[in-house]
Amino acid sequence: MQKFDTKVQLLKYNVLKEVARLSWTDDLLENVTEIPKRIAPGKIPTMRCCVYKERAILSERVRLAIGGNRYQRKVIQVIDIACEDCPTGGYEVTSACRGCLAHRCEEACKRGAIFFDHRQKAYIDKTKCVECGACAKACPYSAIQNYKRPCEQSCKVQAISVGSEKEAVINYEKCIACGACVYACPFGAITDRSYILDVIDLILKSEKNTKYKVYALVAPSIAGQFTYAKLGQVITAIAKLGFYGVAEVALGADRVAASEAEELEEKGFLTSSCCPAFVSYVEKNFPGLKEHISHNLSPAGTIARMLKERDESCKTVFIGPCTAKKTEFQREEYRGLLDSVITFEELQALIDSRDIPVSELPETSLADASPFGRGFACSGGVSEAVAQALKERGSAFPFDPVACNGIEECRAALLRAEKGVLPNNFIEGMVCTGGCVGGAGCLTHGEKGKSETARYAEEAAYEEIASALDAFDK
């Protein structure tokens, strides 16, 4: 059985599995209200103060698992009722305050928010405090701590604030749907809406119509996700769900690398387009650099287009680690190419909803891509692939990339590019730390996923990008 990083992930999986299990047999509408009772049976609470609150929160989880409000297309959403138990203190003076005479905290505060009692112990006047953190930096005892919520701390684009009812509020003008807050929230109060029912509907239609083909497009980071079975067995399980075929998104990455090498030679400066959260970050925060984003679709969109050029009637479902992909496939340039998106978490729920014994299945190998295409999953992999594509073209272009691992590095490179002082001519932007292997929709996070993905890249059938693309074109 798959082991999850946290019990929040396990809870989310249980809801998704129940929703999927009932959807295969058209029993969902009749039993949707019973799902919370199945997950939280009896009258003894296991997660909250009372079982009724547990079920109320579970009902909201079910709502998002079945797609939520179809008119509210935002992917990352807050379950308000699950959010109220989280502290919202901000900067607080702890017991480590020694009542010193220096009062550096008072000097650092430009708002006059620091005051002292008769023992010289510091306090913060919350009516004056603007949460700048200057006092905390000034304190020699580290006695002032920031008790921001985990979601606020995880959101590097500052899209999360605290609402009037102490619930988390997402500013969608800033949000890039990276899902960092989803993974960070210890109460599971922030989650991503699911398109799992749409995928089941696509599969069921294909079972009734032999001309209706649905392809699963698997991201290369799948290699380090399923800890209880071999990758080849997982690929077999995906086919058993009812997919007509399973294609490597890494082959789309090969095509992207080849095209970006050509585009880079032509333009002289480029940022990558493979990470939808990075693309959104550039568009929202550095609009002046938008024209420098590669005009290539992401690897997922590219492999979908490659398949639909062969059979325009086929349907495609991306399966990967990325919550931002759920916003990407709604963009105008991806419509008609990517038909739906699910994460590895949702794939596990789908497989188990049909009781597929993954670890007992024979293996099916994927042999579509080069090691460079598969390497897109890890930070630095895009740069390596573009360098290889330039080499295969016999190009003399002076390629000088900067691989940005995480949003802070992306911001630093983009700021320098905006000011015209970046020495590099290619920015590889990966919002998730480590690259796609650190995506919010992963089943497990850590070094194992990175090492397994690297090993998977080494096992690629084709040594060069061009040979992998030639094999597909034939």
Image (cartoon, rainbow, N blue to C red):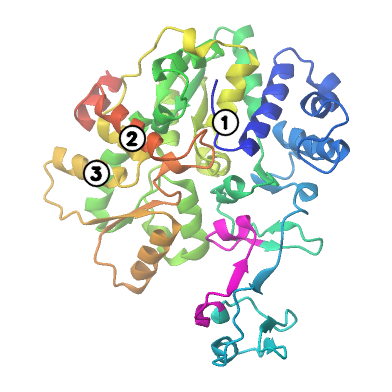
Q: Give the x, y percent position of residue 308.
A: 45, 24
Magenta stretch, residue numbers: 136-160
Asked if labels 3 and 1 touch by Cβ distance under 8 angstroms, the answer is: no
Q: Amino acid at mark 1?
A: Glu
Q: Residues within 10 Å of mark 1 (few under 14, many from 20)?
A: many
Q: Are marks 3 and 2 in contact (CB under 8 Å)?
A: no
Q: Secondary structure at mark 1?
A: helix
Q: Amino acid at mark 3?
A: Glu
Where residue 211 sits, quadrant-wise, is: top right
- Residue depth check, mark 1 versus mark 2: number of the one nearer the observer: 2
Q: Residue at x 88, y 37 (%)?
A: 52
* Magenta run includes residue 64: no
Q: On the image, numbered disc 2 is attached to which residue? A: 451
Q: Is residue 301 left or right of residue 195?
A: left
Closer to the camera in the image, 16 or 241: 16
Residue toward you, 387 or 51: 51
Q: Circle 1 is placed at which residue position?
A: 345
